[in-house]
Structure formats: structure tokens, C-alpha cells
Image (cartoon, rainbow, N blue to C red):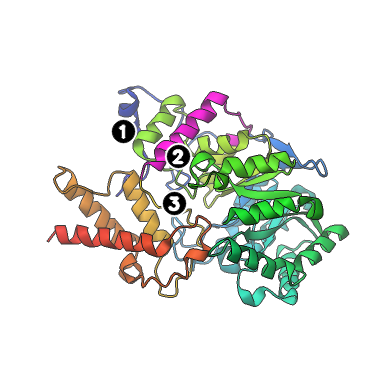
């Protein structure tokens, strides 16, 4: 289980270079947090910017997602339970470095980092001039007790306080479209924003200039997305945040209208700028199965696997900024290299990546992005960690399938030992009772109890076959 990224030796063998020397320094794995020395620094003054058509404001193509902040006791990787103290000094350093290299868009939410993200983001940004940064935050009123007008207003006012600003540059209705079915999703949207007058309040704040741009982030049922866009003449959405990457372009769902291609093109038709989340699909596009990673590294050995996904998202001209949750300085530096400046992909490269995404779809991984909207589980199960371990082993060839395989014993031990190390026994999949409280909150619409049961059965089989 120590093989977290494609090793140099494996890569050279895979692409047929033998003992040849790769020109650039070591490559950073953005998803695993594995730190490797790379002597080259991203250039200053080379950031690519996109223009907001509403006000001609220049927005950095790389946006800083403040969802997974560094923690004091991380020692190279953030704790899965998220209970560790946020390392404010490191947050400050990374924000300073980002601004120095041209990043000006910072995205947060009252819900991120168990409610601590806005506060930490505010501390880091307050040390800079207000015109040096753009703040995006959200009306994250997920719980029914926050669906009153008073609670919505209080949440927005608290965001201003925590972020230490007089206005919000980009305010989002957070994660619209979630629900058990389209009808339930529409009812929840109305309860959160329409029936209580909260959206009317936000529109008033936009008129007053307290909100500069108003939009929404979409997760869920396409009927809600289509409805909100049909109301564009009424609400005049300034932007919309969608999930877009080379996997989701064609493979996000069985329904073509849930794929990123449809979401993006509907915005282009209306000249609404797109803000992109999950360009790495929760890190899955930074830790591809070895055969797929080799195809990328063979084309450009000096670039990280993750950089292809960032360039893919940024190449679409209707994209205003691409968000990345950069826990470590290494993540930030690697992403800056992709966008300082952006070297757009050719049509051939775009099609190549979309084909690679289709190949990835053939791997039976769980489409979890580790957003943690399903957490906390009332029974203590660490859902994201379970899916992350299963996916990681599957893509790295450590998820044994056939007992007759000569590598079965090694793979079996690697999976089981790694599982116990990654997820405490009492938080593993076999403790799921199937209550289903998690699934309605999943932006990827994963049937979480079913997948946990599948993994639990798989683990049980591996244990029995070793007896």
C-alpha cells in the first residue's frame, strides 16, 4: 500500500524509456499529499485571467478552494476526521503565496471545515488590501432549522463578519438540486430560498452592492438546474458553479443531461460564466490507474497527472475560474504551474482526455469526491475514508479478485492491512445499518448504503479466504 503514485522506475518501464533521464524534477501528487522535492518554482506575473462580462473584472483562472485547510498535526496529510486544529500560520503562508502568484479568487462556505473555514479565510485575507482578492461564499442552509428568513439573513450577515468584509464578491445558493427525487429536490429549493423570502433578500443585497455577483452551485437533479436557468431573465444569474472534468464531460450519469457537457453548454447559451468545482473529481484524476497515468506521462513527462485535468477545465472559454482545494503548498505550486500561464489543450488533446475518462469509467470505483456532505454518519461510519481506500486499491491493483491469481496473497494482505490502518474497525462498512440518511446529501447521487454493503461483503470474503 506504499505505492501512492506511479514510481519513476515504473513510469520509465511503462513508456519504454528504460534508464533514460526525465528532464524535469519530481512530480507532486495533488490527491495523496505525498511531498516530493521539485526545484522549479511557478513564475510570478504569469497567471492567466478571465474577464467577468458583467463588470469586466479580471478573475484568476485558478481559484483557491478553502474546503480542505491544513491542520497543525497533519504531518503531511490532513486528518480524515477533520477534528484537528487548522494551522492558521500555514493558511496565511499559502494565501500569501497564492496572491503573490496572481490568484485572486478565494471560495469558502459556512459549512466548510466544520464551520471554521470562513473564519480562517477571513484572518488570512484581512492581511491584504481588499482589491487584491475576490471572496466567494455560500448560503449553506442545509438543515431544516435554517430555512427561516431570520436564519438565512443571520447566516449571510455572519459570513460578512467572519470574512471581515463589507461585501461579498460572489454569493452562491449552495448545492441546489439535492433531494430523494426531482419533486423533493424542488420542494427543498423552495423551502430554502423562495418560500421564506431569502432569495428576495439576497437580490436586495445585490442591488445595494453588498453582493456583487449572485449565483448558485448545482448538485443533484437536473430538473432543478433547468428550472433555475429558465428563470434567468427574472433572477439574472451572474454565474453558476458546476462540476466539470474530462470524466464527467461524458460519463457523469446515464442521463446525458447530467453530464458536464450539457451543464456547461446550457450556461454558454445564456452567456453565464461557469465556475468549476471538482476538476480532479475528488482527487481521482490525480491518482489514475497506472496504465492510464502512463499514457499522460508518456505525452508530457515533465507535467503531473493532475495538471492535465486542470488544463482541460481551463481550456473551455466559458469558464471564469477553476477551484482547487489545496491543502499543501505542493498542491498550490503544481496548480500554479498549470495556469501561470494556461497552455490551452488542442482539440486532439481534449478528445484524448475525454477518451481517457471513458476508460476510467470501466474501473468499478465508487464515484465519491470526498466532499463529506454525507458526514457525520449517525452510526460513526467514516464513509469517505472507506470509499477512498477501496478506490485507491482498485486503481493501484491491490484489490484482489481471483484467488487463483499468483499475486492474490500480496494484494489481499495489502487491502486488509491498509483498510484497518485507514479506517478504525468501529467505523468500517460492516457497521452500516442501511438507514439511508447519507444518500440524499450526496452530490454524486451514490447509493451509499448499497456501496457500503458491497464493500463490506468484499472485505468479509477476503477475510474468509485467508482462513
The residue that mark 3 highlights is: 367
Q: Residue at x 51, y 34 (%)?
A: 308
Badge 3: few (under 14), some or many (20 or more) residues near its Cα, within 10 Å? some
Q: Give residue 194's quadrant in the image.
A: bottom right
Main SS of residues in magenta: helix
Badge 2: few (under 14), some or many (20 or more) residues near its Cα, within 10 Å? few
Element on which disc 1 rests? helix
Q: Residue at x 51, y 58 (%)?
A: 371
Distance Cα–Cα, label 1 vs label 2: 19 Å
Whether residue 152 appears in this view of the structure is yes
Instruction: Pick whichever of labels 3 and 1 is earlier in the sequence.
Output: 1
Which of the two marks, 2 or 3, is nearer to us in this view? 3
The answer to if 281 sits in the magenta stretch is no
- Residue 87, x across and y down, in percent: 55, 61
The residue that mark 1 highlights is: 10
The residue that mark 2 highlights is: 37
- In the picture provided, is 214 more to the left or to the right than 371? right
What range is drawn magenta here?
338-363
- Residue 347, x across and y down, in percent: 57, 25
The answer to if 353 sits in the magenta stretch is yes
Element on which disc 3 rests? loop
Q: Nearer the viewer, residue 424 or 437?
A: 437
Quadrant occupied by the C terminus: bottom left
Amino acid at each position: 500500500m506504499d505505492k501512492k503514485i506511479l514510481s519513476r522506475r515504473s513510469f520509465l518501464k511503462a513508456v519504454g524509456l528504460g534508464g533514460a533521464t526525465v528532464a524535469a524534477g519530481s512530480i507532486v501528487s495533488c490527491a495523496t499529499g505525498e511531498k516530493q522535492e521539485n526545484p522549479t518554482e511557478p513564475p510570478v506575473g504569469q497567471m492567466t485571467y478571465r474577464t467577468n462580462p458583467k463588470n469586466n473584472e479580471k478573475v484568476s483562472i485558478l481559484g483557491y478552494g478553502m474546503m480542505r485547510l491544513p491542520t497543525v498535526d497533519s504531518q503531511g496529510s490532513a486528518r480524515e476526521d477533520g477534528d484537528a486544529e487548522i494551522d492558521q500560520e500555514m493558511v496565511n503562508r499559502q494565501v500569501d503565496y497564492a496572491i503573490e502568484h496572481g490568484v485572486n479568487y478565494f471560495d469558502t462556505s459556512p459549512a466548510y471545515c466544520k464551520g471554521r473555514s470562513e473564519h480562517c479565510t477571513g484572518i488570512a485575507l484581512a492581511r491584504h488590501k481588499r482589491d487584491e482578492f475576490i471572496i466567494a461564499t455560500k448560503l449553506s442552509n442545509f438543515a431544516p432549522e435554517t430555512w427561516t428568513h431570520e436564519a438565512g439573513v443571520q447566516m449571510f450577515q455572519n459570513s460578512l463578519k467572519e470574512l471581515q468584509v463589507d461585501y461579498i464578491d460572489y454569493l452562491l445558493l449552495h448545492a441546489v438540486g439535492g433531494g430523494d427525487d426531482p419533486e423533493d429536490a424542488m420542494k427543498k429549493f423552495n423551502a430554502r430560498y423562495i418560500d421564506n423570502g431569502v432569495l428576495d433578500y439576497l437580490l436586495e443585497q445585490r442591488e445595494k452592492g453588498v453582493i456583487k455577483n449572485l449565483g448558485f452551485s448545482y448538485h443533484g437533479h437536473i430538473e432543478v438546474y433547468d428550472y433555475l436557468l429558465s428563470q434567468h431573465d427574472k433572477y439574472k444569474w451572474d454565474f453558476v458553479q458546476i462540476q466539470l472534468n474530462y470524466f464527467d464531460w461524458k460519463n457523469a450519469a446515464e442521463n446525458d443531461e447530467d453530464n458536464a457537457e450539457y451543464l456547461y453548454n446550457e450556461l454558454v447559451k445564456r452567456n453565464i460564466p461557469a465556475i468549476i468545482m471538482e476538476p480532479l473529481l475528488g482527487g481521482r484524476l490525480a491518482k489514475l490507474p497506472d496504465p492510464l497515468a502512463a499514457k499522460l506521462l508518456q505525452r508530457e513527462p515533465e507535467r503531473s497527472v493532475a495538471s492535465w485535468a486542470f488544463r482541460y477545465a481551463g481550456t473551455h472559454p466559458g469558464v471564469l475560474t477553476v477551484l482547487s482545494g489545496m491543502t499543501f503548498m505542493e498542491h498550490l505550486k503544481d496548480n500554479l504551474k498549470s495556469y501561470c500561464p494556461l497552455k490551452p489543450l488542442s482539440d486532439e488533446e481534449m478528445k484524448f482526455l475525454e477518451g481517457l475518462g471513458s476508460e476510467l469509467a470501466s474501473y468499478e470505483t465508487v464515484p465519491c469526491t470526498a466532499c463529506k456532505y454525507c458526514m457525520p454518519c449517525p452510526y460513526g461510519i467514516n464513509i469517505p475514508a472507506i470509499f477512498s481506500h477501496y478506490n485507491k486499491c482498485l486503481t493501484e491493483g491491490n484489490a484482489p479478485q481471483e484467488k487463483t491469481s499468483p499475486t492474490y496473497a500480496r494484494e489481499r494482505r495489502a487491502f486488509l492491512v491498509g483498510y484497518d490502518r485507514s479506517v478504525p474497525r468501529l467505523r468500517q462498512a460492516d457497521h452500516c445499518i442501511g438507514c439511508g440518511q447519507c444518500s440524499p446529501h450526496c452530490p454524486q447521487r451514490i447509493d451509499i448504503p448499497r456501496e457500503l454493503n458491497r464493500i463490506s461483503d468484499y472485505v468479509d470474503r477476503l477475510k474468509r479466504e485467508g482462513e
